[in-house]
């Protein structure tokens, strides 16, 4: 198979249309078998539920070329399960897990020429999503849905290496108490856009959101979970019912315990504790771990000892180990790597 003529090392994190995508329709109480299509255009009624009441959920995962030349995805079963949890919360039908994984396989195989070669720093990003497609004018769930999955080759989230970023503590909330903060719904990300752009306009890279009930505990950013490192090299990650359960964070916690022999605490983290940590990172699919160098809380600054030039030592080890597992340089736990046979 001949790869597309793409300057892989020059790719940014942006959409490039590929040859095929997958679509399945939900009508009369069931999903159809689904199929690949060349058509990247979606045509829906002006009164479609997704346009009126934002009934949509999504996922994100990647396909990689490993060191020995295989094409793999990382824990797609967990993406299928999380999509199901998100759908159930918005009264949408759950897309079957086996069909989800088959859709991933079909799309990657059909776009194998777009899977970047090993060592290029690029990957094939996969975006599964669902939305209510029939016309709804009263406030209620849709009766018909589409599940779709497309692929796009992307470069590393950070060009030239992951330089530590600066966060500010937001005065606004990401999610309501007992709301939808723990699911991957489009409406949550729409809610974060104003705070994100306002942070950028004021010279910050992202926001730190505190818990919506008391504004005393660390939650997450607009799209990533936090990991902290203590002075005695313990990993601490916030626990809350309104945090999205990150698959990357879950994997890093396992890596910390089982590969690096580190103690891990998953618990509520008071904001007043943050100044005592020595390293901080944001974890998610796009970047794996984004190091944080500084957090600004109005007129107060918290500067981590790891500095603004590079990842701290412990976060770097976590990053190297997890990416090593994903790329086949390090043996993976059973079930983590899903090979796609061409």
Image (cartoon, rainbow, N blue to C red):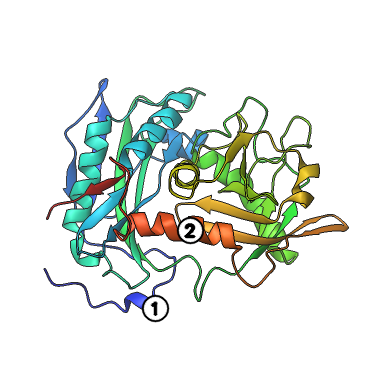
Residue 213 can be seen, yes or no: yes
Query: What residue is shown at x 19% (from left), y 38% (from top)?
Result: 34
Would you place residue 204 above or below residue 45 in this image? below
User: Across the whole image, how many numbered discs are drawn on residues?
Assistant: 2
User: Is the residue marked by circle 1 packed among few (<14), some (14-19), or many (20+) residues within 10 Å?
Assistant: few
User: Is the residue marked by circle 2 packed among few (<14), some (14-19), or many (20+) residues within 10 Å?
Assistant: many
Residue 306 occupies quadrant: bottom right
SS state under label 2: helix
Residue 290 can be seen, yes or no: no
Q: Nearer the viewer, residue 141 or 215?
A: 215
| Residue 111 x/y as whole percent | 21, 60
Label 2 to label 1: alpha-carbon separation? 22 Å
Dot label at residue 10: 1
| Residue 104 x/y as whole percent | 25, 46
| Residue 199 x/y as whole percent | 71, 59
Of labels 2 and 1, the one closer to you: 2
Would you say the residues marked 2 and 1 are in contact, meaning their CB atoms lie under 8 Å apart? no
SS state under label 1: helix
Q: Quadrant of the N terminus?
A: bottom left
Marked residue nearer the N-terminal end (2 or 1) = 1
Query: What residue is shown at x 41% (from left), y 36% (from top)?
Result: 48
Going by the image, does 296 lie left or right of 48?
right
Q: Quadrant of the C terminus?
A: bottom left
Q: Nearer the viewer, residue 41 or 275?
A: 275
| Residue 276 x/y as whole percent | 77, 50
Would you place residue 97 above or below residue 59 in this image? above
Q: Residue furthest top?
A: 29
Going by the image, does 12 lie left or right of 99?
right
Question: Which residue is identified by label 2?
Answer: 319
Going by the image, does 236 lie left or right of 114?
right
Dot label at residue 31: none
């Amino acid at each position: 198979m001949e790869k597309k003529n793409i300057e892989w090392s020059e790719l940014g994190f942006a959409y490039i249309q590929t040859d095929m995508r997958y679509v399945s329709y939900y009508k009369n109480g069931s999903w159809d078998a689904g199929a690949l299509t060349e058509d990247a255009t979606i045509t829906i009624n002006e009164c479609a539920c997704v346009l009126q009441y934002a009934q949509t959920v999504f996922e994100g995962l990647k396909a990689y070329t490993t060191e020995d030349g295989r094409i793999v995805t990382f824990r797609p079963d967990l993406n299928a399960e999380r999509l199901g949890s998100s759908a159930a919360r918005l009264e949408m039908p759950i897309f079957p897990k086996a069909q989800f994984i088959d859709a991933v396989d079909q799309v990657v195989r059909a776009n194998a020429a777009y899977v970047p070669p090993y060592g290029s720093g690029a990957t094939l990003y996969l975006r599964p999503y669902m939305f209510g497609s029939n016309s709804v004018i009263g406030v209620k769930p849709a009766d018909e849905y589409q599940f779709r999955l497309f692929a796009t080759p992307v470069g590393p989230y950070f060009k030239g290496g992951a330089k530590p970023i600066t966060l500010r503590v937001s005065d606004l909330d990401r999610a309501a108490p007992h709301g939808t903060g723990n699911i991957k719904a489009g409406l949550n990300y729409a809610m974060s856009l104003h705070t994100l752009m306002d942070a950028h306009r004021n010279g910050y890279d992202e926001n730190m959101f505190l818990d919506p009930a008391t504004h005393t505990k660390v939650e997450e950013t607009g799209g990533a979970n936090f990991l902290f490192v203590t002075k005695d090299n313990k990993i601490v990650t916030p626990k809350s019912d309104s945090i999205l359960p990150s698959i990357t964070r879950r994997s890093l916690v396992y890596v910390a315990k089982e590969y690096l022999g580190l103690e891990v605490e998953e618990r509520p983290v008071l904001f007043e504790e943050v100044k005592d940590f020595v390293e901080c990172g944001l974890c998610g699919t796009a970047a794996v771990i984004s190091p944080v160098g500084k957090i600004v809380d109005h007129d107060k600054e918290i500067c981590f000892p790891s500095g603004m030039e590079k990842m701290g030592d412990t976060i770097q080890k976590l990053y190297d180990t997890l990416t090593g597992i994903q790329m086949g340089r390090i043996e993976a736990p059973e079930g983590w790597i899903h090979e796609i046979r061409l």
